[in-house]
Amino acid sequence: MILKLKDPRLRGPIVARLQEALDLPVIDSVFGPQTENEVKAFQFSRQLKVDGIVGPATWTKIESELDSNPLDLNEGLIYDVSERREKPRLFEGFRLWAQIFGVVFHQTGCYLGENPERWARVNCHYGLTREGKVIKVNPETYFIWHAQGLSKYNIGIEVDGHYAGIEGNPNTVWKDGPSICNLSAGQIMGLELLKDHLKAQFLLNAAEWKNIFAHRQSSEDRRSDPGSEIWQVALSWAKDLNLDRDKFDGGCTYKKGTGSTIPKAWDIQRAGKY
């Protein structure tokens, strides 16, 4: 995960732990100018590149100096409510990791809030709150109906909020929904954490991550799901994972059942139609 000074400010538990590791006098969980200055001072004193950006090299150096209390970048950022007894409402059965090939991005179309327990009844595997909390809602090995024909072999990811189908175009917003939003700085950080977490899970379970889909590809009623802004995250994930550029989402003509193809407005390199 990379932390740096930007607008809107990055904030959350991971920033707080960075500030604690650097022994800042004020721990406010916000990556502001003071935090950037402290990062630069740390980098200068350790002969690292002085850019104020907390990337892999700076994280590694910070962790190497915390042997007695190592910095767990995941601690407190993934909230696990998947161990409850009851199965989700649309639970179909169990599956093997070898049967999981990718993920499906969704938007909630509403605001579920920050309480992890409120997410416990959502038919998905992971949820992302507006503040950027990553919530493990159900085990990956649960076959849950979350995206019609794409459900059996994929992990469902719900991003909290109400997003336009095409960012900036009010005609592509679901009717009767709450106020329209954009991804928050916390959500952008949380999505990076979730990507890294899932990469580790696929590797740990000897499974190959092949696909990233949009819910709209499997349902005629979900044409705005997850929306163009969230799909840009999907594109960045595919690039980071070195997935086949023309196949990771099935290709420009791919849809399942009553679904719709990925529109050109979501990916200018494609020829889909909204």
Image (cartoon, rainbow, N blue to C red):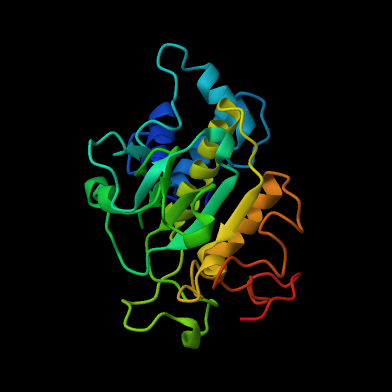
Given residues 122 and 28, the one toward you in this image is 122
Considering only vertical position in the picture, is 223 above or below 120? below
Q: Is residue 134 visible?
A: no
Q: Is residue 204 visible?
A: yes
Which quadrant holds residue 79? top left
Q: Residue at x 68, y 69 (%)?
A: 267
Return the x and y of residue 120 as percentages of the image width and height. Answer: 26, 47
Return the x and y of residue 185 as percentages of the image width and height. Answer: 45, 56
Residue farthest top in this picture: 68
Given residues 166 and 106, the one toward you in this image is 106
Q: Which quarter of the image is occupied by the C terminus?
A: bottom right
Given residues 173 and 22, the one toward you in this image is 173
Left or right, 193 with reference to 116: right
Q: Which quarter of the image is occupied by the N terminus?
A: top right
Q: Residue at x 63, y 41 (%)?
A: 209
Return the x and y of residue 194 as percentages of the image width and height. Answer: 49, 43
Which quadrant holds residue 14? top left
Given residues 95 and 123, the one toward you in this image is 95
Residue farthest bottom in this picture: 171
Q: Residue at x 31, y 76 (%)?
A: 178
Considering only vertical position in the picture, is 62 above or below 108? above
Q: Residue at x 44, y 19 (%)?
A: 70
Please tell me how many numbered marks the rendered image carries: 0
Return the x and y of residue 57 as percentages of the image width and height. Answer: 64, 30
Considering only vertical position in the picture, is 65 above or below 232? above
